[in-house]
Image (cartoon, rainbow, N blue to C red):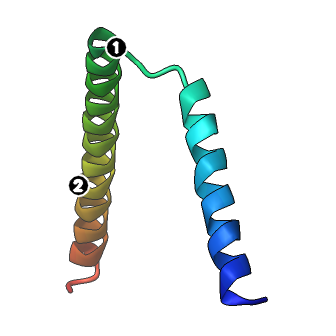
Amino acid sequence: MSAIEKVKGTRTFVEECWVELQKVTWPDAEQLRSATIVVLAFTMVVSAIIWLMDKSAGFVISRIMGIFGA
């Protein structure tokens, strides 16, 4: 494959990408704000669940270790 063919292939790729981007329905500000709030809320809930699981596991392990004098 020559350099000219690579340049033509790259140009074709960029043109096709641009055409596809024109077909995209972009969210408006309100949709974007709502989606961001949902993602942040979900992230906080999952983080809290993982934190609780970590603290619970640590508590259980420390109790088990305490039974055996460690």
Determine which residue is flagged by label 1: 28
**N-term-proximal mark, 2 vs 1:** 1
Q: Is residue 27 above or below residue 19?
A: above
Determine which residue is flagged by label 2: 55
Left or right of 46 in this view: 11: right
Left or right of 35 in this view: 15: right
Q: Nearer the viewer, residue 25 or 49?
A: 25
Mark 1 closeness class: few <14, some 14–19, many ≥20 residues within 10 Å: few
- Image quadrant in which the N terminus is located: bottom right
Q: Residue at x 66, y 87 (%)?
A: 3
Q: Residue at x 20, y 86 (%)?
A: 70
Q: Is residue 29 above or below residue 57?
A: above
Q: Residue at x 24, y 65 (%)?
A: 63
| Number of numbered discs visible in the structure rendering | 2
- Work out which residue is located at the far right of the displayed protein and give it: 1
Q: Secondary structure at mark 1?
A: loop
Residue 29 at what x, y percent from top left?
Answer: 27, 15
Q: Residue 37, located in which quarter of the rendered image?
A: top left
Distance from disc 2 to disc 1, alpha carbons, whole Å, reads 41 Å
Q: What is the three-letter code of the residue carrying label 1?
A: Asp
Between circles 2 and 1, the one closer to the viewer is: 1
Mark 2 closeness class: few <14, some 14–19, many ≥20 residues within 10 Å: few
Q: Is residue 2 above or below residue 33?
A: below
Q: Secondary structure at mark 2?
A: helix
Q: What is the three-letter code of the residue carrying label 2?
A: Lys
- Work out which residue is located at the far bottom of the displayed protein and give it: 2
Residue 51 at what x, y percent from top left?
Answer: 25, 50
